[in-house]
Image (cartoon, helix red, strand yellow):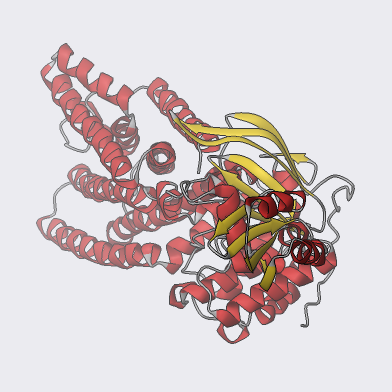
């Protein structure tokens, strides 16, 4: 099937052009630094001997800090790796030999999407799995609802991939990059405004945050993921920078799914109709 | 030249329908009309030259044929399938103009990829890829990345890519522009082989000498419209320029020449005529002698395709 041929080509390109390997290599460095850090803190905690609850809170904090960074890196990776896949091939003309083959254009878009999705989920799995594994190996701690949380993080990466495809089907590479990072920035700052608004009971600030989540629900997905995995105590107090005082509802997750589907759908529609 | 072709078990399209059939095809980009009204038919097994000045809409037309660009109006069929229908492209090979390919692939990987896109069975692919690498003279470079290829090598691998699926129609957009004389001869030989196999070739080329050697019929287009479609042979044989040196050339003598040629131009003792057939030459000579004219020279000159191109298209169309 042509879609799978394109998916394989895309994955192979990411591998052959060192995108995946550089990311994984630096991921190893990231995990090494993270592991050393967690280990040091673990030794301190063992020496000072605080209570079980306090230690558990500390490990959860460390775990969430690691995932927060991984989430950010995976988002960057999703955009950087895919930002020129459609627009770049259109600009260079390499698309001509593909499109003139007996396949439909949606197969090119979906094939590329699948290729990137596989690569990004592999990357996220390696990084998030690394964080999870290191914390567990060092301290024996496992956060609650880890699978749900990681699934939401994976979904978040795919969401950004869909948006990057939508921009790539209609804009130049640079404009697409500016668009996706711009939207991500709005969602990011919106998330923090909502967080502070919730802590201070300011409804306007919360509303601004929700509005930003509607513009791009990426931060909302992360916050939902963080909510799932945070410790019950932090959830009750709502004080950690990685936790969610204002928790995005399952409805927001459904909205994100609709958003991603529509973005990819419009990307296919636009790419199928445009002159190449 | 050895050019064995293995058999693909894909369904052949109906051999009765023309290779290309377009009617009133039009493409506008905003206000700009790229192709005004393109109507032409390319028969099975013929080598068809598509000629026109820069900016005449040739590349836009080729892209419309292949579904890269949607037409604003008009309709067309490729091997019987409507333009844009992927099924029609199953038996079509295409060499794009700028031959930009995924250059991080090796030559063999590149051909295998496109064989997959043509849905060729794997066992056939391996054999076919090797044959084609041999055909275009790149067997020694099969494991080399396309990034390291010269322009001519890229064109050769692009040509191999266009032949993978045993096409019934091959569309070549400027296939020889980057090639040295050896490469050009290769392209010519391949076109001949394709014609012998009954494959239609649609050749968009600026190199008129190439077209002159290879094509059965040519279309001249300008401002996105077909000015003339003619069999090349009759076009070249049909027009015969003759230069006559004789005296005295009186107005009566000149008027009498009108029965053979309607373009008579006098330049002192020299006369320039255009005839429709070579057989008129002795008659003209006889006529001049009978009129008491002394004939010093009567020299037929074949028109080259370039002369015809300028005659038909003019010199004002190039952009």
Question: x, y (%) of residue A69?
Answer: 24, 49
**Can the viewer see residue B94?**
no
In the displayed structure, would residue B241 be above or below residue A109? below
The residue drawn where x is 34% and y is 56% is A127
Question: x, y (%) of residue B82?
Answer: 73, 37
In the displayed structure, would residue A131 be above or below residue A182? below
Left or right for B22, reference A241: right
The residue drawn where x is 77% and y is 58% is B234
Left or right for A109, reference A29: right
Left or right for B252, reference A39: right
Question: x, y (%) of residue A23?
Answer: 33, 62
Please state which of residues A258 and B215 is positioned toward the viewer in this rendering.
B215
Please state which of residues B313 and B1 is positioned toward the viewer in this rendering.
B313
Please state which of residues A19 and B200 is positioned toward the viewer in this rendering.
B200
The residue drawn where x is 86% and y is 53% is B12
Q: How many marks?
A: 0
In the displayed structure, would residue B36 be above or below residue B247? above
Please state which of residues B117 and B205 is positioned toward the viewer in this rendering.
B205
**Can the viewer see residue A270?**
yes
Question: x, y (%) of residue B180?
Answer: 53, 79
The residue drawn where x is 47% and y is 26% is A258
């Amino acid at each position: 099937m042509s879609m799978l041929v394109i998916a394989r080509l895309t994955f192979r390109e990411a591998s052959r052009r060192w995108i995946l390997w550089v990311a994984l290599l630096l991921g190893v460095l990231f995990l090494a630094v993270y592991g050393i850090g967690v280990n040091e803190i673990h030794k301190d905690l063992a020496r000072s001997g605080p209570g079980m609850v306090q230690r558990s809170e500390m490990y959860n904090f460390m775990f969430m800090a690691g995932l927060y960074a991984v989430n950010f890196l995976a988002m960057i990776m999703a955009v950087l790796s895919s930002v020129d896949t459609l627009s770049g091939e259109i600009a260079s003309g390499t698309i001509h030999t593909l499109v003139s083959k007996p396949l439909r254009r949606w197969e090119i878009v979906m094939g590329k999407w699948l290729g990137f999705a596989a690569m990004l989920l592999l990357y996220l799995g390696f990084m998030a799995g690394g964080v999870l594994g290191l914390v567990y190996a060092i301290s024996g701690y496992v956060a609650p609802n880890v699978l749900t949380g990681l699934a939401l993080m994976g979904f978040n990466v795919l969401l950004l991939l869909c948006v990057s495809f939508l921009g790539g089907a209609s804009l130049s590479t640079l404009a697409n990059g500016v668009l996706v990072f711009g939207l991500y920035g709005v969602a990011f700052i919106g998330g923090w405004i909502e967080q502070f608004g919730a802590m201070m009971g300011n409804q306007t600030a919360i509303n601004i945050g929700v509005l930003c989540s509607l513009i791009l629900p990426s931060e909302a997905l992360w916050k939902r993921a963080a909510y799932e995995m945070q410790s019950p105590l932090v959830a009750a107090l709502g004080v950690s920078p990685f936790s969610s005082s204002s928790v995005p509802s399952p409805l927001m997750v459904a909205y994100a799914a609709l958003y991603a589907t529509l973005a990819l759908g419009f990307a296919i529609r636009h790419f199928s109709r445009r002159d190449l | 030249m050895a050019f064995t072709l293995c058999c693909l078990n894909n369904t052949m399209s109906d051999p009765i329908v023309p290779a290309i059939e377009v009617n009133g095809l039009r493409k506008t980009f905003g206000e700009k009309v790229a192709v005004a009204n393109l109507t032409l038919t390319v028969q099975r097994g013929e080598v068809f030259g598509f000629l026109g000045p820069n900016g005449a809409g040739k590349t836009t037309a080729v892209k419309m044929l292949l579904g890269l660009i949607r037409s604003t109006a008009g309709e067309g069929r490729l091997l019987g399938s409507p333009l844009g229908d992927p099924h029609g492209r199953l038996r079509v090979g295409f060499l794009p103009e700028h031959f930009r390919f995924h250059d991080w692939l090796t030559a063999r990987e590149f051909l295998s990829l496109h064989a997959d896109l043509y849905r060729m069975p794997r066992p056939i692919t391996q054999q076919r890829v090797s044959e084609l690498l041999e055909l275009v003279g790149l067997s020694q470079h099969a494991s080399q990345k396309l990034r390291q290829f010269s322009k001519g090598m890229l064109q050769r691998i692009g040509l191999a890519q266009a032949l993978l699926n045993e096409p019934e129609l091959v569309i070549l957009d400027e296939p020889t522009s980057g090639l040295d004389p050896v490469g050009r001869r290769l392209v010519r030989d391949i076109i001949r082989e394709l014609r012998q196999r009954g494959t239609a070739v649609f050749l968009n080329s600026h190199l008129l000498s190439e077209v002159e050697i290879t094509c059965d019929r040519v279309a001249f287009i300008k401002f996105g419209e077909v000015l003339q479609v003619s069999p090349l042979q009759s076009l070249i044989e049909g027009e015969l320029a003759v230069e006559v040196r004789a005296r005295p050339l009186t107005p009566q003598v000149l008027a009498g020449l009108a029965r053979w040629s309607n373009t008579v131009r006098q330049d002192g003792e020299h006369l320039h005529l255009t005839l429709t057939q070579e057989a008129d030459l002795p008659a003209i000579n006889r006529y001049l002698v009978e009129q008491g004219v002394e004939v010093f020279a009567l020299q037929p000159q074949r028109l080259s395709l370039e002369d015809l191109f300028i005659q038909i298209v003019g010199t004002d169309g190039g952009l």
